[in-house]
Image (cartoon, rainbow, N blue to C red):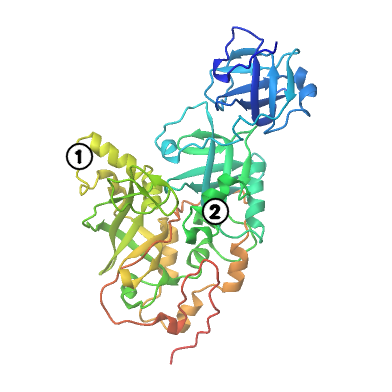
Amino acid sequence: MSRKVDSVKDINDSKETWRLAVRIIDVWSVVNNKGIEYLEMIVMDSLGDRIQVLIRHDHLLKWKEVIKENMTCIINNGSVYNNDFQWKVCDHSKKFVFLGGTTMKAIELQNIPPKGYFFKDFGEILQGKCKTDRLEDIIGAVSEINHIQSNTPGKKVVVSVVLKDLKGNCINCNLWEIYGSKFLAYYNDPKNNGAIVILLTHAMVKDGQVSNAWSGSKLLINEDIPEIQDFMSKLPTNEQKEKPTQSAKSLSNWSGGSQYSSVERFVHNAKCMSLSQFCKIKHETLCVTVATTLKFAVSKYGWFYYGCTRCSSKAPNPEKAYEYSCGQKVEQPIPRYKIEIYVSNGESKYRFVFWDSKCAAILGITAEFMHNSMVENGEDDPMVYPDELEMLLNKKITFRVKVQPTFSQASVWKLCDDEVFVKEIENDYIVEDNQSKTEYAKLVPNKENLETSAQTLSVSGENDSKSIILMTPAKDVVIADKGEEVDFEAFGATQLSGTKPSKKLKIESSS
C-alpha cells in the first residue's frame, strides 16, 4: 500500500516520515560567514500552502544538480524544526530539513498551482504594516533614479530608485551590488526605451523602504512574464512610453562624461519662464518655473477623489462597484489625492494641481490612510483639509509643469526645493518678458548632445546634494490670468512628446 500524501499546513515536529506532493517555487544558494554553502527553497502543495526547506552542506552535492525551480515532485522523509531563519519567506511556523534518508522523485502534478509571486502592498509598507523578519515580493514601475554609488574603497555599488505601484503609492528601493549593476546595465542599453517595471523577490522591508537580500533575491526587469506584462499594460499610456529620469540628486553626482549639469537636464525640452508669462501661452507647453506654494484652492470636490484601487481612474459613483479601464472591478473605490494649490511669484498667482502619487510621496502616507484616520477621529466631512496637508505650503520650489490653457491649470511633473538649485534656475534660466529670442536661445542646452548624455547612467561615488525631485503622472495642466496671447511656437516652443524628439529650433535675433 502506498503512503498517503500529507498537507504542508499539517507539518509539525511529531514525526520525520512526511510524504509531500509539492512544487518547488524558489530555490537559492547561501554561503554563510564561514564560507559554508547550503541550499534553501520554498515548496508549495495543491492547497497553496508553503514551507521553507533547508538542505545542509553535507547533503549539498546529492541535491544541488537535481533540484530545479518550478519542478513538481514527491518528497519523502525529513526533520521538522521551528522556523528560526533570520529572514522568513512564508508564514509557516516550521521549517523542513532534508535528512540522509530523504528521497525525492520528479513527477508531473497537474493539481499544484503554477509558480507565482506574493506581492506586498505598497500602502501597507508605507503604513509600517510589515513583519520585521519577513522577506516580500515587490513589483513596481521605476518613476525616478535618485541615488547612485560606485564600488569604491569602503563603499559598495548601490542604486536607489523610486518605485510606484498601480495605486500611485511610491516607495524607495535600494539595489545593492550585482542587483544595482544589473539595473544600470539595462538602463544604459540604448535598445531599452520606455517604462521600466521591476520585480524583486525576497526583498527586505524597513522604514518604508525595500532592498534586495544578500542571498535569494531575484531581480527581473521588463521580462516577458505575465506579472510584469500585466503590470505594464495597466500603466497609463503616456507612462508606458516614458523612460525614468534621474533626480537632481543623482544627476549632480553623475560621471557620464557629460558637460551638462543637473539643472540643464531638468530644463531640457522645456520653456523656462516666469509665472507672469503663463497667461500668454496659446498651445499646450512643457514649462519650468519658480514659485512659492501659497494656499489651497478649495474646490467643491475637496482634497481627494474616489478612484480605482489599481489605476488612477476616477470612480463614476463612489458607492457602487465599477469596472475600470485597467480591467479591475472595484467594489469599494479608494480616496486619491487631487490637491489644487495657488502658487505665486511676485504679483503673479496660478493654480497648480498636485496629483495622488506625488502627494503620497511628499507626505509619506496615502490619501486612503489619511481619510480613514480622519473618519476614525470623528471627522467625515470631505471638505475638511487635514493639518498634514500644510506640509505642501510655503515652499519655494522649482516646478516642471505641463501647461494646458484650455483647462486653466498647471499639472506638476517634477519639482525641486533645493535652495541652490532654485536660485540657479531663477537667476540663469527664467525668461522674462523683456528678453529677446536670441537671449532665450542661449539658455537652452544643445539638444542633440544633451539627449545623448541624458540617456546613459554611470556609477559615481559621492552623493551630497540635497535636491529633491518627485516624478508625477502626466496629467492635465495649468492656469493663467487673462492677458495678451502669444504663440510661443513662433520662437521655437515645442510640445512634449513621449516618443518623438522635438524639432531643431532655428531662432533668429529679434529686430
Estimate how packed mark 1 is, as few (under 14), some (14 to 19) or many (20 or more) residues with alpha carbons within 10 Å. few
Kind of residue indicated by mark 1: Glu
In the displayed image of the protein, which residue is found farthest to the top?
14
- The answer to whether 244 appears left or right of 354 in the picture is right
**Pick the front one: 503 or 152:** 503
**Which residue bears the numbered disc 1?**
379
Image quarter where the C terminus lies is: bottom left
Q: Nearer the viewer, residue 260 or 400?
A: 400
Kindly tell me whether residue 136 is visible in this rendering: yes
Q: Residue at x 44, y 36 (%)?
A: 125
Q: Which mark is residue 279?
A: none
**Which residue shows up at 54% across the image and 21% down it?**
92
Query: 375 or 47: which is nearer to us?
Result: 47
Query: Residue 73: percent from the left, percent from the top?
Result: 69, 25
Name the residue type under label 2: Ser
Figure quadrant of residue 7: top right
Residue 252 makes an appearance in the image: no
Tell me what residue is drawn at x 59 percent, y 42 percent.
Answer: 175
The quarter of the image holding the N terminus is top right
Q: Is residue 482 left or right of residue 35?
A: left
Q: How many marks?
A: 2
Instruction: Kindly state the secondary structure of the residue where label 2 is placed.
Output: helix
In the displayed structure, 236 sits above or below 334; it is: below
Q: Position of residue 139 (x, y in %)?
A: 53, 43
Q: Where residue 502 sits in the image (x, y, percent)?
A: 53, 74
Q: Quadrant of residue 449?
A: bottom right
Percent position of residue 79, x then y: 66, 12
Mark 2 Cα shell of 10 Å, populated few (<14), some (14-19), many (≥20): many
Q: Which residue is mark 2?
A: 250
